[in-house]
Image (cartoon, grey):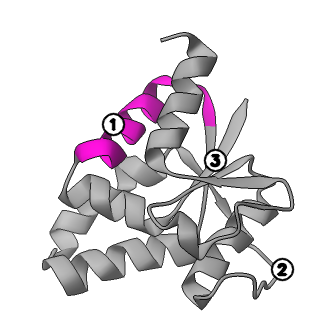
Amino acid sequence: MTSVVIDSNLYISALVFGGTPQQLFDLLQREKVRLYLSEFIVDEVSGTLVRKFGWTSEDLEEFLPPLWERCTLIRPTLRLKVCGDPDDDHVLECAVAASAEYLVTGNTKHFPGEYRGVRVVTARQMIEQLETRTGE
């Protein structure tokens, strides 16, 4: 079973704008994929939605729990300094701690292409990978 960590920016993009990130989440709902996230990702998504997009606590309570319920919460203990941005390091820490095969992000240039067995890909690349696997 494929194991994946989704970067905060894709949760936000799917919720606010739709498009390819939403297509990825729709596909993930149908596929047998293990999804992992950390408290950092949860906090970054909710904080950004409130600060940048004016979401209320009611909005968060309506839309976020259905996203999180499919995920396994990881509490990384390893601290990395691999990415240029410490926030990106937190996401990579989650992926490494989960032994995820993929970290899916809208900012691939901020991450190494591969790190400790975790491949960093875009939403479109993940969609293509899943569709190839299922023969769609």
The kind of residue tagged 1 is Gln
- Residue 62 in view: no
Q: Where is mark 2, residue-wise?
A: 78
**Distance between the alpha carbons at the discs numbered 1 and 3:** 15 Å
Which mark is drawn over residue 4?
3
Q: Which residues are magenta?
A: 19-33
Label 2 residue SS: loop
The kind of residue tagged 3 is Val
The kind of residue tagged 2 is Leu
Q: Say which quadrant the N terminus sits in.
A: top right
67 or 134, which lies in front?
A: 134
Image x and y of residue 129, in percent: 59, 30
Q: Where is mark 1, residue-wise?
A: 23
Q: Relative to 117, is 124 on the left or the right?
A: left
Instruction: Look at 56% across and 49% down and name the residue there.
Output: 71
Q: Nearer the viewer, mark 2 or mark 1?
A: 1
The total number of labels drawn is 3
Image x and y of residue 122, in percent: 50, 51
In the rendered image, residue 29 lying in the magenta stretch gets the answer: yes
108 or 44, which lies in front?
A: 108
**Distance between the alpha carbons at the discs numbered 2 and 1:** 32 Å
Q: Relative to 58, is 35 on the left or the right?
A: right
Instruction: Look at 63% across and 19% down and name the residue there.
Output: 133
Q: Earlier in the sequence, mark 1 or mark 3?
A: 3
> Relative to 119, does residue 76 appear above or below in the rendering?
below
> Relative to 68, does residue 77 appear above or below in the rendering?
below
Q: Relative to 40, is 4 on the left or the right?
A: right
Dominant secondary structure (helix, strand or loop) of the stretch shown in magenta? helix
